[in-house]
Amino acid sequence: MNILVLVKQVPDTSDVKFDERGVMIREGVQSILNVFDQFAVEEALRLKQKYGGEVSVMTLAPEQAKTAVQKCLALGADKAYHISDRAFGGSDTLATSYALSLAIKKAGNFDLIMAGNQATDGDTGHIGPQVAEWLGIPHVSYVEQVVSIDNGKALVKSILEDGYRMVEVELPALLACLPPTNFEYTNPSMSGIIKAKSKPYIWWKADDIDGDKSKFGLNGSPTRVLKMYPPPKRSRGTVFTENYQDAVKKIVEALMEKKVIE
Amino acid sequence: MLDFTFTEEQEMIRESVRDFAQKKIAPIALEMEKTKQIPEEIIKGMAELGLIAPTVSPEYGGQGFDAVTAGIIAEELAKADVTGSIPVFYLVQASWGHIFDKYGTEEAKKEILPNVTKGKWFLGIATTESDAGSDVVGTRTTIRKEGDHYVVNGEKMYISGVREAYTRGGGHITIAKQNPELGAKGMTLFYLPLQSKGIIPTYVDDLGREGISTGGFTIDNVVIPKHYIIGEENRGFYIVHEGYEYARGLISVICAGAGLQSLERGKKYLKERKAFGQPLAKFEALQFRLAEHYTKLSFLRLGAYWALWTYDQEAKGKATRFEVSKAIAMAKMFASEWSNAAIDEVMQWQGAFGYTRECPDQAAWRAIRSFAWAEGSKEIMRVIVSRELLGKEYISYK
């Protein structure tokens, strides 16, 4: 069972602040491994323990993302692919997923490709499904658990808004993983950190992967981000403390005044 | 050229330890003052991550970390545990695990160290007696050889982790006189299991770091096997000082870490708390105090890592024993004093709340106060530095 997990380094969103222009303040904000991806890595390592094989991780990101990738190796992943080149600058999810799919083809055959369902910065949830489409393999999103792997098929638990569904998917497939609400990520052990240093870490540039280079980076990105801003702060609202008949009357009047109802 | 950066690996270690410590230790720290013990799941978590005696070689269950890396772990634990209990649990085992690994017999290392690194047993140090602390030569406990084993008699006092080793298993690296007439040159170091027949423990009620016990034990004709001797017979005095130097280096980092963390809490308070219509942080008098304490503690932190680095240089043949002693003593000389002063200041900013047991800083203050003498008093640090500067012939007590 050879598994590849796609990972991304993101700003620690528990500490994100915006300046008065609405631009995210990156200074002093720590970069961390996307927690959705860490869950995917831990799920992949659990499968490795059960079915054997190897777990590789891959990222397409600037060099500084190495710390997030190293963390995956320290957690127990066997090999890392880091695709980094200025040519990928300004990539949207389409261009990123295209480049990733080319790198995956070059890296070899995987029975299973896993990814976080979304990254905590962009929050698009695009990359996993898009990579699968470029590769022409089936994909399942919102995967909380890989229940079993048997006869070239994986049985997975995929979360829905009001429940879950069990999906059987033929391998190779891509699973976009969603950590359960009680997921507590593992801290890499000291020995894991030491071992990570001697594991294969493969760097690729744009020239190392075959494909249509016009689809890389900004040129291959139809998406344009015009502005990033936090949602406007909501005011506290008006509280009516009269008896409920009077309060309802006042609420209806207020809503009519604002033309919410007529 | 100077390079003040940690390696990528060390940064990852810091990150992993910090995350664990802030997530698991910080929220329960003050509870340890009531329960008087470190929760079992914390010890288990530390063992799983490889944080107990990581200075021990991998073949005996450790990580083979050098002193600087051991210091990084100490700093992060100190930032999370305001009571100082876990830092003490850590530093004692890291320092004496290192000494055991370096000087212990193969047989003893295989038998004891894996149990220590797994968190099952506790490994401590027992040199202090009621009448002998800094003056190690004043030790009254004796060890004598009888055939293929040794017999120990005496008493030890003010020892960290007595309850831990007595109840969990493990023991203390202990010093005793084998040839009293030879003074420092007649002392032997050995491993003393605290569950041995003839050991009776006693406990003292410490002012701080209450999650780990302090106590003593009487040693009544305790028999220990030959392979428990650490290093050569009669060399104990010298080996024990090497271990103390290691521990002093870690203590210096702990003092810096705890003090800086207290200033972080204080900084937040200064910004939030208003008086006379403005945040306390707007008052220049308080700003200056913050700046001064932060500067002192940053230099302390730097000095502490430099001292640990010097210790590591000795292992590479690039520093002498005396250079190490001096560097470590310089780092520890003001460690508790500066850290306590900063924490005291933060308590002051918080007014009446700073004087309550709910305030984390008061617990930190009590813990850090112990390091003014623990593992070598601040007065002894001055003796060491002046001895290295002036020469042995000027040692005042000789």
Image: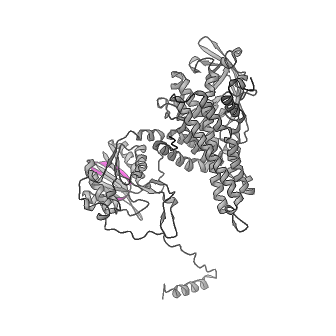
In this picture the colour scheme is one colour
From the image, which quarter does the C terminus of chain B lie in? top right
Report the span colored magenta: A140-153
* Front residue of this view, candidates A251 and B364: B364
* Front residue of this view, candidates B387 and A243: B387
**Image quadrant in which you'd find residue B95:** top right
Q: Is residue B83 magenta?
A: no
Vertical placement of residue B194 versus A61, above or below? above
Q: Is residue A144 magenta?
A: yes
The answer, for residue B81, to whether it is visible in the render is no
Q: Main secondary structure of the magenta part?
A: strand
- How many labels sit on residues? 0
> Which residue is painted at 51% across and 87% down in the image?
A256
Residue A48 appears at what percent x and percent y? 35, 44
> Which residue is painted at 50% across and 57% down in the image?
A29
Residue B340 appears at what percent x and percent y? 70, 46
Position of residue A147 in the picture relative to residue B308 (left or right): left
Vertical placement of residue B72 versus B61, above or below? below
Position of residue B61 in the picture relative to residue B360 (left or right): left
Residue A239 appears at what percent x and percent y? 60, 78
The answer, for residue B260, to whether it is visible in the render is yes
